[in-house]
């Protein structure tokens, strides 16, 4: 299959074909989601929580995320691979952002990068896009600003809807090829999606977006416990692995593995 490109995403929006995106942080999940026809694979800084075991996305570093990105880029035949710029690796200046994004493209093979922020990120988005790096923006609730935003909260309710709308228009004008909207009221996200020419990818932003993204450990049930309202669970990988591990342990302890056919 042909590689998904930014212009394909724009054409999908124009046709009304929904865009699919999942996170991936390693080669097997990347290859599997690619085989399923997922359009975009995001090597999210959510690897901080979902792979490295941190409480938030803040601690993950560029050096930690690059090898995961390389694994995903190496396995994705069709999907467009999005490198997620970690907290502190692009906010200082457009130059810092450009140099970080170049590392994701050169050292890890990402096809584009994602960064958080709206109006305030315009100079960074302009710098990257002028330098040949496609940028996906991320507005609404932006996890890297969790402490500044006062925790996980819906953004754009009531009179703050216009702020999210201004962010969306600003990142489009700056050259972003798409924009993630996280935890934005469905009616607000739908209006913004209709107004923008570039595709919107929603997470907790309702069905009016041009595409959807979920963290795979949430969507397929590797993570257990309380899930955000916007998550739908499509599989129960935790149970599959738990049963597999218990059966293996029972076989080893009971002496039924390895059997003669596993033995040289
Ligand atoms: O890091 C991530 O997983 C993300 C998505 C939730 C959009 O940024
Ligand atoms: Na992220």
Image (cartoon, rainbow, N blue to C red):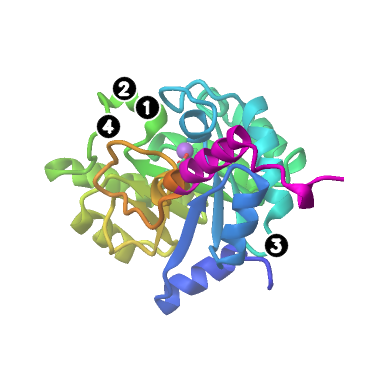
Could you tell me how far apart the alpha carbons at marks 2 and 3 are, in whole angstroms?
Answer: 38 Å
The stretch of residues the image draws in magenta is: 240-264
Q: Residue at x 87, y 45 (%)?
A: 264
The residue tagged with tag 4: helix, strand or loop? loop
Expressed as whole percent of the image width and height from the top left, the position of residue 113 reads: 58, 44
Can you tell which of label 4 and label 3 is closer to the viewer?
3
Residue with the most extreme right position = 264
Residue 195 in the image: above or below residue 94: below
Mark 1 = which residue?
145
Mark 4 = which residue?
152
Can you tell which of label 3 and label 1 is closer to the viewer?
3
The numbered mark, 3 or 1, whose residue comes first in the sequence reads 3
Mark 2 = which residue?
148
Residue situated in front as seen by the camera: 77 or 104: 77
Ligand 2 within 8 Å of disc 1? The answer is no
Q: Are marks 1 and 2 in contact (CB under 8 Å)?
A: yes
Q: Is residue 256 magenta?
A: yes
Mark 3 = which residue?
77
Residue 86 in the image: above or below residue 24: above
């Amino acid at each position: 299959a042909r590689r998904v490109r930014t212009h394909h995403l724009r054409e999908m929006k124009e046709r009304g074909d929904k865009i699919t995106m999942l996170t991936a942080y390693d080669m097997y999940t990347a290859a599997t989601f690619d085989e399923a026809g997922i359009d975009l694979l995001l090597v999210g800084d959510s690897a901080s929580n979902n792979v490295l075991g941190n409480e938030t996305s803040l601690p993950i570093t560029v050096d930690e995320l690059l090898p995961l990105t390389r694994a995903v880029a190496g396995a994705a035949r069709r999907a467009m691979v999005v490198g997620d710029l970690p907290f502190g690796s692009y906010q200082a200046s457009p130059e810092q952002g450009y140099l970080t994004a170049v590392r994701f493209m050169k050292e890890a093979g990402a096809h584009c990068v994602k960064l958080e922020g709206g109006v305030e990120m315009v100079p960074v988005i302009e710098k990257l896009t002028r330098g040949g790096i496609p940028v996906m923006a991320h507005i609404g609730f932006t996890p890297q600003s969790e402490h500044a935003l006062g925790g996980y909260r819906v953004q754009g309710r009531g009179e703050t809807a216009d702020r999210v709308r201004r962010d969306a228009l600003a990142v489009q004008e700056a050259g972003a090829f798409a924009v993630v909207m996280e935890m934005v009221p469905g009616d607000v996200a739908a209006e913004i999606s209709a107004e923008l020419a570039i595709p919107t990818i929603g997470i907790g932003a309702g069905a009016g977006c041009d595409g959807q993204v979920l963290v795979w450990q949430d969507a397929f049930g590797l993570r257990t416990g309380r899930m955000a309202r916007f998550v739908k669970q499509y599989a129960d990988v935790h149970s599959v692995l738990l049963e597999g591990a218990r059966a293996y342990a029972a076989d080893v302890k009971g002496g039924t593995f390895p059997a003669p056919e596993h033995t040289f």
